[in-house]
Image (cartoon, coloured by chain):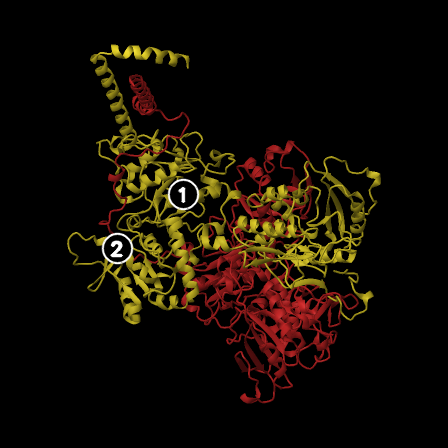
Amino acid sequence: MQSWKRKSLWLALSASWLLLILLGVSPLLRLAVPSRPLPGAPQGWPRWLDTELLLSFFQPGELPEDVPRPSRAPCGSGCNWAACFDTSQCRGGGLKVFVHPAPGPISETHRRILASIEGSRYHTFSPGEACLLLFLSLDAPAGEPSPVPLQWNGGKNHLVLSLHPAPRPKTFQLGQAMVAEASPTVDTFRPGFDVALPLLPEGHPFRGGAPGQLQQHSPHPRETLVALAEERGGWRTAGTDSSACPWDGRCEQDPGPEQTHPGVTLPNATFCLIPGHRSDALRFLQALQAGCIPVLLSPRWELPFSEVIDWTKAAIIADERLPLQVLAALQEMPPARVLALRQQTQFLWDAYFSSVEKIIHTTLETIQDRVFGASAHPSLMWNSPPGALLALPTFSTSPQDFPFYHLQQGSCLVGRFSALIWVGAEGQPPLKLIQAVAGSQHCAQILVLWSSERPLPPRGKWPETSVPLTVIEGHRKVSDRFFLHSAISTDAILSLDAHTSLSTSEVDFAFSVWQSFPERMVGFLTWSHFWDKARGSWGYTAERANEFSMVLTTAAFYHRYYHTLFTRSLPKALRSLADEAPTCVDVLMNFLVAAVTKLPPIKLPYGKQHQGASPPPASGSSGPKPQTPDLDCINLMAAEFGHMPLVSSRLRLDPVLFKDPVSVLRKKYRSLEKP
Amino acid sequence: MCASVKYNIRGPALIPRMKTKHRIYYITLFSIVLLGLIATGMFQFWPHSIESSDDWGVEKRSVHDVPVVRLPADSPIPERGDLSCRMHTCFDVYRCGFNPKNKIKVYIYSLKKYVDDFGVPVSNTISREYNELLTAISDSDYYTDDINRACLFVPSIDVLNQNTLRIKETAQALAQLSRWDRGTNHLLFNMLPGSPPDYNTALDVPRDRALLAGGGFSTWTYRQGYDVSIPVYSPLSAEVDLPEKGPGPRRYFLLSSQMVLHPEYREDLDALQAKYGDSVLVLDKCTNLSEGVLSVRKRCHKHQVFDYPQVLQEATFCVVLRGARLGQAVLSDVLQAGCVPVVIADSYVLPFSEVLDWKRASVVVPEEKVSDMYSILQSIPQRQIEEMQRQAQWFWEAYFQSVKAIALATLQIINDRIYPYAAISYEEWNDPPAVKWSSVSNPLFLPLIPPQSQGFTAIVLTYDRVESLFRVITEVSKVPSLSKLLVVWNNQNKNPPEESLWPKIRVPLKVVKTAENKLSNRFFPYDEIETEAVLAIDDDIIMLTSDELQFGYEVWREFPDRLVGYPGRLHLWDHEMNKWKYESEWTNEVSMVLTGAAFYHKYFNYLYTYKMPGDIKNWVDAHMNCEDIAMNFLVANVTGKAVIKVTPRKKFKCPECTAIDGLSLDQTHMVERSECINKFASVFGTMPLKVVEHRADPVLYKDDFPEKLKSFPNIGSL
């Protein structure tokens, strides 16, 4: 018993000692020897003992703000938008521009710019109505006197536009006028007031313009990494490791594997290094077109349209003093970034820079955005395809209303459509068609556009439908069908002709396809265009072929936005052309959509059972007579657009089990296969 | 063992000899130990005052104990700020040399107290906010304590509020900083610039080339691309925790809460209130508040008292009018309340305007148009207003809510200028987290149809079926647009056949030997791939006709950002099991294509190899299955688009086999594939696959048209 007691006593004692040592030593040690911070660890900003007692930088009692209203901002060189532009003159929808007549004889460019503005949606003939007065300073060589125009008004609400760097009119004061000039120097440029234009090469196309030169999204594996713009005008390619400072004279002695490309031809390179001098601004546009990512070395000039274009998405603005760092960064740039930059160069080139006309329109659109304030283009519209000239803020300022930005916005399309039936000359209510369309579960409403000479049939003549049916009286013009019908409530429009024959199943399938391609036209009947070598002009045909480039609007799904674009953005000349020749309307709509999307439309299978029922696929009575001289709309339009936007496709989208040798009961869209 | 035995033997002999003295000795010893134990335990667990370990190493002093520096009256004064300064002229970028992390290094001068010849202090030593700001910088990745490695220097001289300092002496204090060098690479923070009566819009302290992060810049004083415009911090936001309030219509359409307004503006606002009645609320100082009520936290309209800033949550638009200064702290309060600021301050450079898109969160109204304000605001659609409310709240959370947020955003902006190739994008600055999550940015966003002449590279993954492989090579080589053939030899135990044995084809043929037999080798971005289009094809796919393959390539050209394949598959939601199910029945829908033969952009090889989320890539290699499902997930997730199934082809089978559709499929295979879908969906955190009801056929497929005139007459069967 005793021994047990002793043993347990000892045990408890030793255990307690052990515990004491374990627990007690470390804090005691810590107390005794204050540990020093590890050498090299940052000391950091001290934690003050009296942090809580520190006073705020701003005492609430201190409210000194009772001062006279600040004087108006100084004018002249000190102008800014709020001080020197009077927006009260800009009422109504959109910017109205008046162009001062040129005092003397004018050059070809000047004349064409004038014509282009006059044909555009911005123009007005009355200076009193105008919100912006444009003074074109295109031809006046520096030094030659140019008289102060009438209605100059101290330059208020004036824009002096010059496509060259700074040959401003010398004889009169700019006053409060804004300046739009090519590559202005950073020091004189007034952000938010002036507009920076690109420096254009001689003979820059006026309209249309060459597309970007990039043929593929990602760089070719053997492509050179870097090309450098040379003073003499050529481009020099150099391996990144050959010399540490390819733009510095010091490295000339190291030739390395470099090559000089004389002239303006751009080498195949991923990045184009452009020195920052003002004269090098020309190279910037060159690189942009070639899809060679511009690397600007401390540019001393303002980048074109920097107010609206986010250049960090298409170019790299680097410091010329850090060659090693820049080259290393270019070499290590992740492929995803290179891919994005390359594509953005092409988009920007094509959207804003490829022609003089686009540059002028971009300038006016920039100023219109300032006037619009909250209802201007969001940045997304400027900086992603199709670009701000084709995405009109008058339609909506919410990107999700447009057919282009659903993915970026993470938004969804509404799963309904509106059918728009155009009743032409024959003037019969298309009863069967209405029933077929109303049978679709996705149909939200049916609109009948009565464009016939005959009187509107009474209410009772129209069939009973499960969806609302609205009859609108048109102006008996073919372009009526693309006007903005406020009654249309859905994103999707199914455009139909009274004599079109479609089944409910076809409508359902077409709508399901359109939801995958909301920016394109999805239709059943197609035409294709071709280059007629013998005549040296474009032609188009309705003959069935292995490819197509247009779908007829007699049976097609497209986005409601294209109505706005048709009405608001097309030059007047084109719209009147469409009214004169009814077949032209289809061509025009296809041109418009293709110019926006740069993609072909989508064709769906069209049952043979309809072929007899439908007259030759054209609206109105006249069939497609492609080469009739008086209906040469395709060439007129190609001229007006400046290029041929149509793109051919060789595929058709069918239901997944289309005409497969499997049980018909498996098939959802079996009626599409009826013989 | 032995010792204890001995002890046990000896023990009993000892006990009878133990005297009382001994016993007392033992008990005392024991109690001492016990006491010690208790004391130690208490010491361990008592909330005591020894600093927690993360504070170790940071000095703990009072701001009043800092060294005093006497500035002689004739010590040098820096030049005034140079208005023409730009990064490439006034900033010494060499100090920021190559840096693998692309982060600038910021040094903070230690705190000193500056006094003049008479011992009168130059300014308050440091304000609470400036201390917070320097603490934030010191805690960030930017901080360095090595003055020689620093790229940016932040003086500890507090110039946040110009009113609290003596201008000339502060300038002298700046000039004597050890690395001042005309202010090069020095960053000053100032929120309240100017002084009565004319209130300059930038700090009046001469500062030479130093960068200024200023609140209240006007376009005349702001050096674009050099200075940084910052908010005027509102100390209220630290005190008040506003309840969450979503976007939507609110009680007042327009509210003005500023206490000090120019009488002319107040007249304009009162006129608006008279005209539009209850939807406009113009608040003012409270005149007869009871004692002890903070006047900053109350606003009055006539005799009605409102809590500030809570009242801001009741309004859709809130007026932010300029005072003597352009920058107003009320902007911060307004944003916090999710009220859309109506900024009326001509020429004011909004905070962080270099990177923030204020059009999305505010309305700027010219000073002249105060009286038209209401109608301007009314023309904004409700949906856009809600978007702005959301955006305003997000700007506050991200860039306004603390001094730390302001400091870090400022440094990020400067960092982006110095390392532009690593800069943060517009979307990262501006998109609220909800949009960032749901949006998809297609890596191939440019609508571009690659030229046909480019052709495609066929990649055949093979193990040892040489005979079948050679047949595939021969068949594929007949496709007109094939430009190169790459055989990925996945068998490490066997060498590929000799060169002479391979079929002779018209395009280059390359064999790549892999180091390990892995399925992911098929999707590796080999340098040998020179075309953008890649055809992945198994070594037993011999049933595809040349027309079928060529047509597949043509379809890919029209949809270069999608997977274009032949047999389609579908994922379905199994309601009974509550999970995803793989479906290979011949249905009317498609959401995946098999990569046994599929065209896609070679960039997806890069994504598959290097950017596949989670452990999917290793998982696929370990299970030797589902690499095609993984590829379908990856492409759909990054593009947000569906696959394109081409031609009626429903399955890959060798013509020799006589398998009956459906029945031949191994049940366990289906279970495994379903598991893959569930696994991938959980790794991706979403189901990216898109279901469509269409497939692509040649324009004249099965049309009543002469076969020989068709481009792709031989399109194959199921």
| Colour chain A is painted in | red
Name the residue nearer the viewer: B621 or B412: B621
| Colour chain B is painted in | yellow
Q: Distance between the residues labelled 2 and 1?
A: 34 Å
Q: What kind of element bears circle 1?
A: helix
Q: Which amino acid does label 2 sit on?
A: Val
The percent position of residue A589, horizontal first and vertical second, equals 62, 70
Q: Residue furthest left?
A: B291
Residue denoted by label 1: B408
Q: Is there CB contact under 8 Å for labels 2 and 1? A: no
The percent position of residue B565, horizontal first and vertical second, equals 69, 55
The percent position of residue B587, horizontal first and vertical second, equals 65, 62
> Which of pointers 2 and 1 indicates the residue nearer the eye?
1
The percent position of residue B442, horizontal first and vertical second, equals 58, 54
For the C terminus of chain A, which image quadrant?
bottom right
| Label 1 chain ID | B
Q: Which amino acid does label 1 sit on?
A: Leu
Name the residue nearer the viewer: A602 or B716: B716
Residue denoted by label 2: A67
Tell me: B694 left or right of B368: right
Residue A83 occupies quadrant: bottom left
